[in-house]
Amino acid sequence: SKLYYIDRYGYPFIEPAAGMDLDYPVITGIRDISETHDLKAKLEAPLVFLRKATNPHLPFQQVSELHVDHDKGLIIYMVEYPFPVFFGHGEIRNKYNKLWKVLEILYKPRKQGMKIARVAYIRLDYLEGRVIVGYSESG
């Protein structure tokens, strides 16, 4: 397997060379591709997410990894706090908007209550319209 830069439509346009700056999100987990349409289908959710993330609310530079899992769907990892954000399958735009609202609450400084440093995971795939924020004991 190789690493490629892709454009906004999912087409590879350059294979990074040793020493190149690779400060972009990585899309992982894509396997078993026999046809171009297979690749396009598997890249659809990560590309929709990245298009939404190119706004001031959640710049794509804050996204470290977009993992495509056959069973679990799209899973996002951020740079600063690398807990998993489970998007699941479908409704990426709506789930992104929910994530943005949750992160807005979590990033606000507080004396008590929800703190982003304690987050173990965020689930946007549990029940339709619901978000679960799991916390770790430490943090």
Image (cartoon, rainbow, N blue to C red):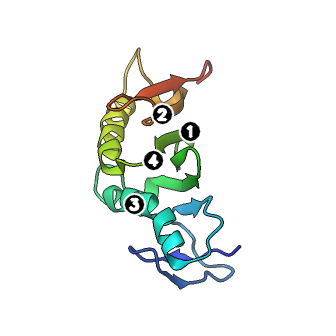
- Packing grade of label 2 (10 A; few <14, some 14-19, many >=20) is many
User: Circles 2 and 1: CB distance less than 8 Å?
Assistant: yes
The image quarter containing residue 112 is top left
User: Circles 1 and 3: CB distance less than 8 Å?
Assistant: no
Marks 1 and 4: which is nearer the front?
Answer: 4
- Whichever of labels 1 and 3 marks the residue nearer the N terminus, that label is 3
Work out how far the residue at label 1 is from the one at label 3, CA to CA, in angstroms.
18 Å
Which amino acid type is marked by label 2? Ile
Q: Secondary structure at mark 2?
A: strand
What residue sits 29% from the left and 43% below the top?
97
Name the residue that disc number 1 marks.
83
Name the residue that disc number 3 marks.
50
Q: Is residue 76 visible?
A: no
Work out how far the residue at label 4 is from the one at label 3, CA to CA, in angstroms.
15 Å
Work out how far the residue at label 2 is from the one at label 3, CA to CA, in angstroms.
18 Å
Name the residue that disc number 2 marks.
122
- Whichever of labels 2 and 1 marks the residue nearer the N terminus, that label is 1
Work out how far the residue at label 1 is from the one at label 4, CA to CA, in angstroms.
19 Å
- Whichever of labels 2 and 3 marks the residue nearer the N terminus, that label is 3
- Whichever of labels 1 and 4 marks the residue nearer the N terminus, that label is 1
What residue sits 40% from the left and 29% below the top?
127
What residue sits 50% from the left and 40% below the top?
86
Q: Quadrant of the N terminus?
A: bottom right
Q: Is residue 104 visible?
A: yes
> In this image, 108 relative to 67: left or right?
left
- Whichever of labels 2 and 4 marks the residue nearer the N terminus, that label is 4
Q: Is residue 50 above or below residue 94?
A: below
